[in-house]
């Protein structure tokens, strides 16, 4: 794909979002209603995306439906949801509110993953 085609695809995916002066491409929005671990994982994921020269939105509200994605990756037409206190089933139910055609990736927080590995509750770790 050439650069013009890549940008067109990104823009087509971005059209799924509500327009707002609070949302900016490739900027991480912090939501204090989420836990610190959740927000740190969001920053980590966005850093990895930016390293790969991919474009994204965080706390992305969709035009139709009631969903808000943790991260919307424009290059992949993909939503990244960070599991922190919610189960995969809850996340899948939430994702049903998203527009069709977007793939869903669920990631655990680093602390949550380490706690599971050590068989500890995440708040103890």
Image (cartoon, helix red, strand yellow):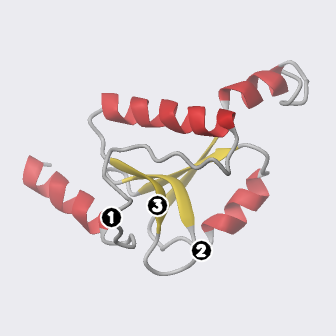
The reply to whether residue 108 is in sight is no
Q: CA distance from mark 3 to mark 1?
A: 12 Å
Q: Residues within 10 Å of mark 2 (few under 14, many from 20)?
A: some
Q: Which residue is the site of mark 3?
A: 60
Sequence order check, earlier mark of 3 and 1: 1
Q: Is label 1 in contact with label 2 (beta carbons under 8 Å)?
A: no
Mark 2 and mark 3 residues within 8 Å of each other at the beta carbon: no
Instruction: For the C terminus, give its image quadrant.
Output: top right
Q: Is residue 47 shown to the viewer in this render?
A: yes
**Residue pointed to by mark 2:** 97
Q: What x and y, as percent, mark residue 21?
A: 33, 64
Front-lying residue, 59 or 87 = 59
Identify the residue shown where x is 86% and y is 18%. Answer: 118
What residue lies at 54% left-to-right and 39% top-to-bottom?
A: 42
Q: Residue at x 66, y 35 (%)?
A: 36
Residue annotated with mark 1: 21
Q: Is residue 7 left or right of residue 87?
A: left
Foreground label between 1 and 2:
1
């Amino acid at each position: 794909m050439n650069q013009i085609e890549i940008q067109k695809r990104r823009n087509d995916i971005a059209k799924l979002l509500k327009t707002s002066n609070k949302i900016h491409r490739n900027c991480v929005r912090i939501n204090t209603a989420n836990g610190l671990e959740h927000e740190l994982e969001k920053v980590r994921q966005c850093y990895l995306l930016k390293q790969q020269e991919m474009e994204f939105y965080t706390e992305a509200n969709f035009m139709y439906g009631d969903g808000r994605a943790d991260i919307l990756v424009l290059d992949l037409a993909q939503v990244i949801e960070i599991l922190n206190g919610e189960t995969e089933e809850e996340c899948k139910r939430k994702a049903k509110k998203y527009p069709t055609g977007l793939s869903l990736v669920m990631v655990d927080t680093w602390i949550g993953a380490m706690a599971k590995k050590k068989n500890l509750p995440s708040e103890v770790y």
